[in-house]
Amino acid sequence: MQGYEIRVRGQVQGVGFRPFIWRLAQERGLSGHVLNDPEGVLIRVAGALDGLAEAISAEAPPLARVDAVEVSGFVFAAPPEGFAIVASQGAGAETRVTPDAATCPECLAEIRGDGRRRHYAFTNCTHCGPRFTILRALPYDRAQTTMAPFEMCDACRAEYEDPADRRFHAQPIACPDCGPRVWLEVEGAERPAEAVGAVLQAGGIVAVKGLGGFHLACDATNPEAVALLRARKRRPAKPFALMGEIETIRLYAEVSEFEESLLRDSSAPVVLLDKAGVALPEAVAPGQDSLGWMLPYTPLHHLLLREWVRGTDGTGAPLVMTSGNLSGEPQVIGNEEAREKLSGFADAFLMHDREIARRLDDSVMRAEPPMVLRRARGQMPGTLPLPEGFEAAPQVVGYGGQMKSAICLIKNGQALLGHHLGELDEALTWEAFEQADADYAALFDHRPEVVAVDLHPEFRASRHGAERAARERLRLVEVQHHHAHLAACMAENGWPLGGGKVAGIILDGLGLGPDGTVWGGELLLGDYRGFERRAWLKPAPLIGGDRAQAEPWRNALVRLDATGLSDWADALFPEAPRDLARQAAAKGINAPMSSSAGRLFDAVAACLGLCPMRQSYEGEAAMRLEALAGRRAAEPYPFTISAGEIDPAPMFAALRADLGTGADPGQCAARFQQGLAAVFAQRAADLVQTGAAQAVALSGGCYQNAQLLRATQAALDALPVLTHKTTPANDGGLALGQAIIAAAQSESD
Ligand SMILES: [Zn+2]
Ligand SMILES: [Zn+2]
């Protein structure tokens, strides 16, 4: 019997796709079947299609992403009876697992309604709920998740088995009769979950077990509570993330339509929003002009905000929701671990008995200009198609850098950039790195032929990669840090392997250059296979090595001395050990030369009085400088350039002159950012206009600064510009660049 076969590719497994096809077939009275296989979803129907192929793309379920619908002829041996959902075929290791997704509107309505899931904290369906964070192993089914210990009740089983039900094959399906439960723990005693409201309203701090880890929560409108949390966490200034319902967020922030769409994305990221309206205590995010907000993304969070912490006016209070961890360590995920580690911070624990299999921090994004600052919960395990020319790329693993570590796997023309892990110096983060390495390899049945690492031999990730390559006789490719940033930006934008050279403005923290000095403010001209350094910030010594990163005055001192402004440095930093620092710089003792743009930001921030003696967290000085500048339009400060070397001395001279005449420090900060953007943009534009480069790419950690990004884009005007939108511009995106460079270099052999 004649019929059709329809192949659907994309994110189409574990998202309710087969019942969706079943429903479309029922509506059209079609007979045939649907199944999952390693390539996606396969549909076979007898007779006519009756618009089925079009409906698949147009009406796909919320969490699905349809990349292709391919129709071909098919001959049935015997006419099929009815339409069946057939068991998966040949799935195995290729079975996709989708990211965790925020509670859908239907489930939210059930939680607030009168049905059997009223006020149930673990309600979910095929359109929402936990996925990757509860997954222990593939294939993704209940027995392989942390839902395994909960035996489905008859009512849940009936929903699970009914193709017409929203919960058909929803692996974490649960209800109050059979699923996980939530409780409050105060001094070891169990109390009803609702009691959490009283603790928070009294200014207490509560450890809340979420989807990818524990948060520490407090009432964000209560200055004493926020101060208490800062004191207990010994975290003086790093901004806290906030959670609130959309109506609540609007009281404190400006939310554009696009920002609202980001907040409402199924990944429910933290979105940086400009402060507006009612002010929250300054201690929530000292020195910042924006706040990181997220919507409640699990039923537990919805209940917490709407039912348990109801404010006097009937709306829930906004809550601080900061990562529950010991300083420097990754987020806590286990109940026992939480009791052990967080009892010094929290007055109570909002606990539940569904285990978290995978630690995932909240993802962080900015809408304007669009950028992802941290890729984690809700975005894992997302893949990115490799650009044209990489179809035959070998399997590669890239191990990333030292800070903001993340791993990247390349396989079958796709890149999987793993979740944010953190700084590898910390023992538990290192453990998480090793676990992620083994874990992603197992999940994606990955067997690399090539290992890519940073050029820096002392990075733990580099050593790990080199050891693995030696042990397993794999090819090792060492990639220069800023070349990796350039390639990551090109790859994210789908720049083809044969697309020609790109001018990369890479403004970053620190990365080892092939000349043995530390780079970080570069204009590179290159492609996936190689690069040249066309311009760079004039190097300055990092006095005290690592201490130069923590203490901005050290960077200001060397720049001011080089500008002939030593007297100003003496006046600005009277308490700093300037003589020792100058001796170290003169003798070159523990003072490696660096062209880092990040350290130049620190130097300028110190001159403006922004945490000159010490930063309490990485990037504080630069973030405060960005906030101080705001969105001012400003005349750029001058830089000089000679033989490729960009000298900031005239900028410092102008800065001093401005401050000497009482100029607004915010204006000075803006003029610095404009000047830095302008001088690099000019040189990059030259490369495009002379035909040496086909486009300009903007990458490196400094490009998380929205003002710097805007200023550079404006200066490049009508030229083609590549920027980071879905992978981080900072070292979180490094592994992608390493992996694709290694793939390109392996192809050319
Ligand atoms: Zn749902
Ligand atoms: Zn049940």
Image: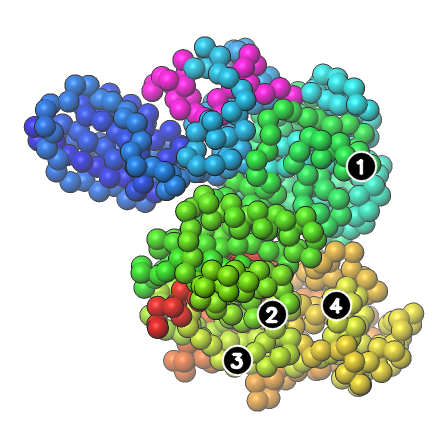
Q: CA distance from mark 3 to mark 1?
A: 48 Å
Res. 270 image quadrant: top right
Judging from the image, the colouring scheme is rainbow
- The numbered dot on residue 533 is 3
Left or right: residue 334 compared with residue 723: right
Q: Reading the chain from its start, which is encountered first: label 1 or label 4? A: 1
Q: Residue shown at 28%/44% (left/top)? A: 68
Q: Nearer the viewer, mark 3 or mark 4?
A: 4
Identity, as a three-letter code, of the amino acid under mark 3: Arg
Q: Is mark 2 within 8 Å of ligand 1?
A: no
Q: Count every numbered label the image shows and give the total.
A: 4
Q: Where residue 456 is drawn, which disc sits there?
A: 2
| Numbered mark located on residue 133 in the image | none
Q: Residue 217: horizontal and vertical position, in percent?
A: 73, 34
Q: Is residue 679 visible?
A: no
Residue 743 higher or lower than 313, as above or below: below
Q: Earlier in the sequence, mark 3 or mark 4?
A: 3
- In screen coordinates, is 584 left or right of 44? right
Say which amino acid is labelled 4: Asp
Cα distance, mark 1 to mark 2? 37 Å
Which dot, 3 or 1, sits closer to the camera? 1
Give the mark nearest the N terminus, 2 or 4: 2
- The residue that disc 1 covers is 345
The part of the image, by quadrant, that contains residue 247 is: top right
Dot 3: what SS? strand
Q: Magenta part of the protein: which range?
A: 158-182
Q: Secondary structure at mark 2?
A: loop
**Which residue does the numbered mark 4 point to in the structure image?**
546
Say which amino acid is labelled 1.
Phe
Q: Is residue 347 above or below residue 72?
A: above
Q: Residues within 10 Å of mark 3 (few under 14, many from 20)?
A: some
